[in-house]
Amino acid sequence: MADNKIHEVVQERYGAFARAMDDPALTQSCCGGDDCGTNVQLYDMTMLEGLPVDVTGLSLGCGDPVSIASLKPGETVLDLGSGGGIDCFLAAREVGPEGHVIGVDMTPDMLAKANANKVKMGVTNVEFRKGQIEALPVDDSSVDVILSNCVINLSPDKMSVFSEAFRVLKPGGRVSISDVVTEGDFSEELRAQTDKWAECVTGAIDSDIYTGMMREVGFTEITVVDKADASAIVLHEAGMPRVFSARITAYKPAG
Ligand SMILES: C[S@@+](CC[C@H](N)C(=O)[O-])C[C@H]1O[C@@H](n2cnc3c(N)ncnc32)[C@H](O)[C@@H]1O
């Protein structure tokens, strides 16, 4: 399947989520949490204090990559596929006024929500850039930490995502990812189901292949921090491999 077809279907789905947040009826049902798709329950609730519902209601991740990133004041952080901005805003608190957070997303409606959320929160150390994670609009060796939450599984070209992540990290920089991975592979027939790809299911790959790609582009100390059954957040059907939500950390060598 052509890469641009996947980008198009993914953009359509997440653009619709972003637009739904502007519908008062849908926003109200998001506060209940169950049927609007928000995955905010994946965070420790104390972390979320002070975040408006426009941010928490548009939390579409599969885990919490911020808690395991050990962010420090003054660091520059990049979030791949930043959506409504939840991880950017959490990271912004940790890096403080001397730090900087860049969120990259390809979906215009998501960027509009993220920027509106930034204004609403009065945050000044976060910026959102339009772009694809396979060709990041970010300078070489300029970032201390890369975060990503349930996005790389959506990419049709994961090798490019990892090699771009490696390029923009400073030597010694690190990644902290939450993502959907599998044990085993989807059949070609299942992979061709673009609706399920956009739902963070059939674009997911075996965790060993995932970490192998990271190793191939140069990452070291690759650690699967935890790996939980994801059947509660992604629909599981007969014939599918087991699907997990994993948190993965790795480093770009310092030398
Ligand atoms: C499942 S949502 C996760 C959003 C956010 N990380 C969160 O935790 O709420 C996926 C997001 O990634 C973006 N995205 C998907 N594929 C992308 C790509 N190839 N390049 C840039 N953004 C992408 C989508 O537009 C969407 O906002």
Image: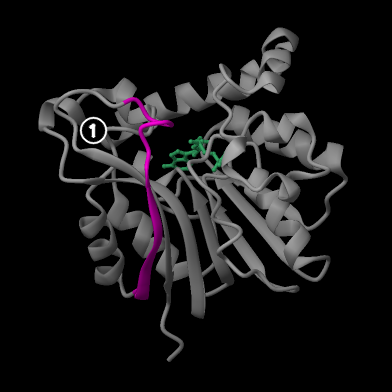
> Given the current orientation, which residue lies at the most extreme right position?
122
Asked if the magenta segment contains residue 221, the reply would be yes
The location of residue 17, given as percent across then percent down, is: 57, 22
The answer to whether 146 appears left or right of 95 in the picture is left
User: Residue 251's image quarter?
Assistant: bottom left
Quadrant for the N terminus in the image: top left
**Residue at 31% in and 24% down:** 196
Frontmost residue, 8 versus 28:
28
The location of residue 222, given as percent across then percent down, is: 35, 71
The location of residue 103, given as percent across then percent down, is: 61, 50
Frontmost residue, 105 versus 62:
62
The answer to whether 59 appears left or right of 46 in the picture is left
Quadrant for the C terminus in the image: bottom left
Q: Which residues are the magenta region?
A: 219-235
Frontmost residue, 42 versus 26:
42
Label 1 Cα neighbours within 10 Å, binned few <14 / some 14-19 / many ≥20: few
Q: Label 1 belongs to which residue?
A: 2
**Residue at 41% in and 48% down:** 179
**Residue at 54% in and 33% down:** 107
Q: Is residue 176 above or below residue 12?
A: below
Q: Amino acid at mark 1?
A: Ala
The location of residue 5, given as percent across then percent down, is: 31, 28
Q: Is residue 181 above or below residue 223?
A: above
The answer to whether 19 appears left or right of 180 in the picture is right
Asked if the magenta segment contains residue 102, the reply would be no
Colouring style: one colour
The answer to whether 202 appears left or right of 41 in the picture is left
Mark 1: C-beta under 8 Å from nearest atom of ligand 1: no
